[in-house]
Amino acid sequence: MLIGLNCFCDTCSSLPRLSLDGDYIVGGLFQLHEKYGGTGPATDTENRKPEVLQCHRFKFSSASYQQIQVMRFAIEEINNSTLLLPGVSLGYEIFDYCSDLLSYGAALEFLTQKGRGAIPVWNGTNYRPKVISVTGPFGSSQTISVAPLYMSEMIPMVTHGATSVQLSSKNRFPSFFRTIPSDKYQVESIVRILQQFNWNWVAFIGGDNDYSRDALTVFQDKIRPANICLAYQDTIPQNQSLIGRLFNNIAMFNVQVIVVFANVEFVIPFIQKAIDLRVKEKIWIASETWSMNQELIKKSQIERIGTVLGVTVQRHKDLRGFDEFINNTVKSRHENACTDMDLKERCGQICSDCNSTSAQTIIGEDPTYSFVIYSAVYAVAHALHNVLRCGTGNCANSEIIAYPYMVTEALKQVKFKLDNQSIEFDENGDPPAHYDIVHWDCKNKTCSNVDIGSYLTNPTPSFHINETLIHWFEGTEVFLQCSSECKSGSRRVQTGFHTCCFECEICSDGKYINHTADPYSCIACQKDEWARNGSTSCTKRSIEYLHSDASLAIFLMFQASSIILISMAILVLFLCKNDTPVVKSAGGRLCFFMLCCLSMSSISVFLYIGKPTEAICTLRNSVFVVFYVACLSCLAVRSFQIVCIFKMAAKLPKAYDFWVKHGGQWITIITTTVIMLFLCILWIAIEGPKPNQITLYSEVILDCTYGVIPIFYVIVLFAVLLGIACFSFAYMGTDLPKNYNEGKSITFSLLIFFISWVISLTVHLSTKGKHTLSVNPFSVLCSLYGILFGYFFPKCYIIIITPERNTAAYFQTAIQSYTLQPR
């Protein structure tokens, strides 16, 4: 059966319509005449005139006419099939609306009952409006305007072009469904394109309707986390003479990437103005309303405006049988259509272009929305199939009357395959999103659409672009940003209102930057971490102390052990030669005490090895200073005694006798040692050394504090003064007999003592680091080795190597030679 084009001139409505009777009527709202262009003015002034608008004065849309034919084709295909609605016929009533005013009239017409007046009548549960569902209108603003009339009666609206995110609200639009994805996903795909090419300085141009306004709101929400800045945003004015202002502003903000998210009636004059103004070297991101528009892509000099990338709903191959249907329709329409005169006199509206449009023109129009209209009709048919409990060969239409609210509930559960595409709706009445990414490929001044990628949300979000398919306009910069990205380790310093405009500042030592989390802030490392300037992460500081298995620690322990062994060996040697002149001249029993003190002092070296504890810190310096001061006091007393014997005994005989009889040397030694011991105990009692962490650049040094600093300074001062006294006495005896001339040996020992600790102090003051941990134990070893080498080794040499010098006669000769020397 061929369904033709009927005017219904005999009933003569004020609205031009296409209709076919059936058991259930599907209403259609299509903008057959569009307000831009046409033979007469289409200004706001005219719209305010108190007169009926005449759609034929506006521009005829062959694209919308094609969409009407797709709806008719789908209904005929369903009626000719016995699988979906056997025994049930679908009809249609299609209105052309060119303004919101006329769309309200069409909406009220759909709400009437058959045989009743134009005013909707409610008579309880038996109320059954003329249509079972409504397909269209295309625009979001028109849909939002008329939808409340249908929502109150739960009449399902299944649209093919209204993409506003507002329509996903089930509180406001409970019976709304659509076969085209929500703009939420379209905006996501556009943001993905911008991210793909690192474009973050963009303009957003829209129309004065809900389609553009809602998209702008979503766009602003999506670009914030994507680090994209909206440099400029504006609305295309209806007055075409004002469009040039937009391009002046775009140039002023130095924007190269322009997202144009508007209906085609806004885009055509906007793009034409760009061509007229010779705007070039721009990158244009087209929304699905115009990315496949054939009128735009065929405009003269369109290739000069730059590179055009766009988003379009997934396109399908041509509908099978549609071309044949169009050819048959065109052949038969002259027999079924009224003349223009009949339409003007009896119907009140004219569609002269409907009769003159060729089949080739209809078939050659942009097929972007063909499948979504086709699937919208089939979705209603599947819902009716479920409501009427259709089976093989028949439906229970004689027993069941389908009401719109039943179809609404059935649509929520609809899920079927159509041309290998799954048709279903989520809880908001939206289908899964599947967009194609297209590029206007211009060669030899001719442009064509080329698929370069896709974006889909089902089953999981997926986005890809084949960049090799893009032919960039000559001179177009692929990387278009307000500011170039900062180098690794540098933070952004915002220079204006927009976050995408910034300068770069390198992060200082001890700080790092995480560009993913916050590209504007340098973050301080934790206490146990460090970072060089320009770092993107922190590194754990190494814990440094003298590990017992380290080579340096082993060396120090070996040397300390050597001192103990050497001291014990000398002690044994001196015990064996206790009665010899060399041992007696060295101090006799005083030497045994000194050697024991040297051995005890060397134990402090072991306390520098390993991780410091409170006990180790307490004993480390105390052990050394007490026993070393005891050793120094012995040397001081010994130097003083020799000087007294040779230089002062004759002058102060009583004082010397008192010193000898009352054990002056031991009293002095014990007194100085006890004073030092008291100072150390006082030091520890008030606040002794404690373990301490010294945080340096890349390491944490585990060391000990010095406790109460004033007492520590007193201890050091006491040791230094004792050393100076010892050095003074030793220097005074440098001209004594060789066998008693220990001044040079003691002087040498003390020089090593002073030099080693001066070096230690200098290192501590001038540098910090793990290597300073070994300075103190080295100074301890040098001080001890100085006494061993300077004082004891010469005597061991005489005892072992030159025993002939270790005799009383040899010593007597040396004394006599000294006394005979002139003074």
Image (cartoon, rainbow, N blue to C red):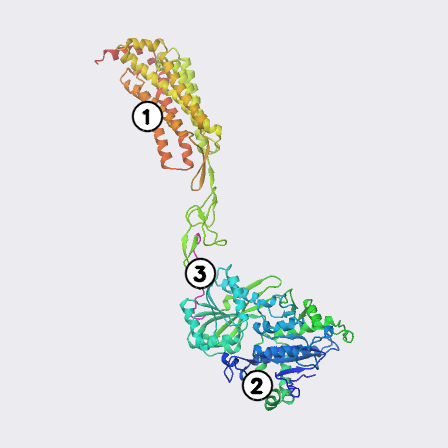
**Residue 514 horizontal side relative to residue 579, left or right:** right
Which mark is nearer the camera, 2 or 1?
2
Which mark is nearer the camera, 3 or 1?
3
Q: Nearer the viewer, residue 561 or 480?
A: 480
The kind of residue tagged 3 is: His
Q: Quadrant of residue 396?
A: bottom right
Q: Is residue 240 above or below residue 485?
A: below
The kind of residue tagged 2 is: Asp
Q: What kind of element bears circle 3?
A: loop
Which is more N-terminal, label 1 or label 3?
A: 3
Q: Which residue is mark 2?
A: 353
Q: Which residue is mark 3?
A: 498
Q: Which residues are magenta?
A: 472-489
CA–CA distance between discs 3 and 2? 50 Å
Q: Quadrant of residue 316?
A: bottom right
Residue 479 drawn at (x, y percent): 44, 63
- Residue 151 within the magenta-colored segment of the rendering: no
Q: Quadrant of residue 57?
A: bottom right
Quarter containing the N terminus: bottom right
CA–CA distance between discs 2 and 1? 118 Å
Q: In the displayed orientation, state which residue is furthest to the left.
A: 822
Q: Which mark is residue 751?
A: 1
Which is more N-terminal, label 1 or label 2?
A: 2
Q: Which mark is residue 443?
A: none
Residue 524 drawn at (x, y percent): 46, 47
Observer able to see residue 562: no
Which is more N-terminal, label 2 or label 3?
A: 2
Q: For label 1, count other residues whose C-alpha is less than 10 Å away and answer few (under 14), some (14-19) or many (20+).
A: some
Q: What kind of element bears circle 2?
A: helix
Quarter containing the C terminus: top left
Residue 606 drawn at (x, y percent): 46, 27
The kind of residue tagged 1 is: Leu
